[in-house]
Image (tube, grey):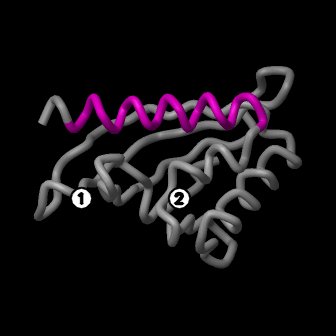
Amino acid sequence: MEDLKKAIGEVNAKIMEAYNRGDAKGVASYYTEDGKVMPPGMETQIGREDVAGFYAKMMELGGKTVVFETQEIGPLNSTDSAFEWCNFHFKTEKGDIMVRGKYVVIWKKIDGQWRVYIDCVSKTE
């Protein structure tokens, strides 16, 4: 279990690094080819191109950095899938919180690499 938490934590760190340097395509590269983001008030974004578009839009709207605060990670019914629930926030260039929320992710291990398969997001403020 600790190996799983460490592995997913490392991918989350890479996702945050990519976002925080303004690389929406880099963020999307950590999703499966058919990965999905399910943001509030929007249609489901399916596939890496749409996922990158979602994160690019967040950047355009002023979200310059993102922080994930993982609450729980655990295995699903196999060794190649897992779940995570997390709190997050996006900050503006000035450091003000732009949006705060939570998400549930289903992870898939593909060719030895953990990738986001489904990312269901909700906004808390």
Q: Which residue is mark 1?
A: 81
What span is in magenta? Answer: 4-22
Neighbours of disc 1 within 10 Å: few (<14), some (14-19), many (20+):
some
Calculate the distance from the C-alpha at mark 2 to the C-alpha at mark 1.
19 Å
Tell me where residue 67 sits by quadrant: top right
Q: Pinpoint residue 34: horizontal percent, then vertical percent.
A: 51, 72
Judge from the rendering whether residue 119 lies leftward or rightward of residue 55; answer left or right: left
**What label sits on residue 121 in the rendered view?**
2
Residue 106: % across, % down: 35, 60
Quadrant in the picture for residue 43 = bottom right
Tell which tag, 2 or 1, sits nearer the viewer.
1
> Taking 65 as reference, is 5 left or right?
left
The residue located at (33%, 57%) in the rendering is: 110
In this rendering, the answer to whether 61 lies above or below 117 is above
Query: In screen coordinates, is 100 left or right of 110?
Result: right
User: What secondary structure do most residues of the magenta stretch adopt?
Assistant: helix
Disc 2 residue type (three-letter): Val
Residue at x 78% of width, y 39% of height: 63
